[in-house]
Image: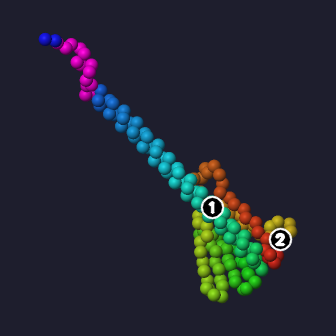
Amino acid sequence: MKTYTGNLRRRHMTLVEVLVYMSLVALVSGLAIRIFFGGMDAAATVRSSSERVLNTFRQGDRWREDIQKAKRVEAGQDRTALRLVKDNGDIIHYRLQEHDLHRIRHDSENGRTATVVVKKVQNCRFTPFPADNPRGWKMALELQTKQDKSKIDPLFDFIAVPQQGGE
């Protein structure tokens, strides 16, 4: 009859070894899950920011088209509002109000239509361009950021010249 000595003990793991391995697996899994969801949050933030920037470019192009079709352009006293008068008598206002840029259209068919075109705007100014001999208009638009230490300032300048001179 054969007797087993120390080899039998080496073939099996003790309860302490199993607990150590389980805690290591749990630790590595926890870190992996944290990194994965951190990456998902970062991707969602990038997607949201890029959509805001794309919308700002689209609305800047829309503003430029409105300026080009305007017969007369007038800026408000504080330069946060702009009034565009078209040949057919339609009036379009652009106004910064409560950190949103509004586009308000008055026409003979539909009456008054107001829409928020860009949300979460820090600052918006409408100024004649160039300053020494104005022939066009400049819209300087700054978006709000969630963090004060943003690496990139979301500042956009759009320039347009009315067909009629816009004086």
Q: Is residue 89 above or below residue 98?
A: below
The earlier-in-sequence mark between 2 and 1 is 1
Quarter where residue 101 is shown = bottom right
| Quarter the C terminus occupies | bottom right
Residue behind mark 1:
54
**Residue under pointer 2:** 135
> Which residues are the magenta region?
3-16
Q: Residue at x 59, y 66 (%)?
A: 119
- Residue 42 colored magenta? no
**Residue 132, above or below 15:** below
- The residue lying at 76 percent from left, 66 percent from top is 159
Name which quarter of the figure residue 83 lies in: bottom right
Q: What element carries label 1?
A: helix
| Image mark for residue 146 | none
* Residue 7 falls within the magenta-colored stretch: yes
Tell which of 112 and 47 is nearer to you.
47
What's the amino acid at mark 2?
Arg
State which quarter of the image contains the N terminus.
top left
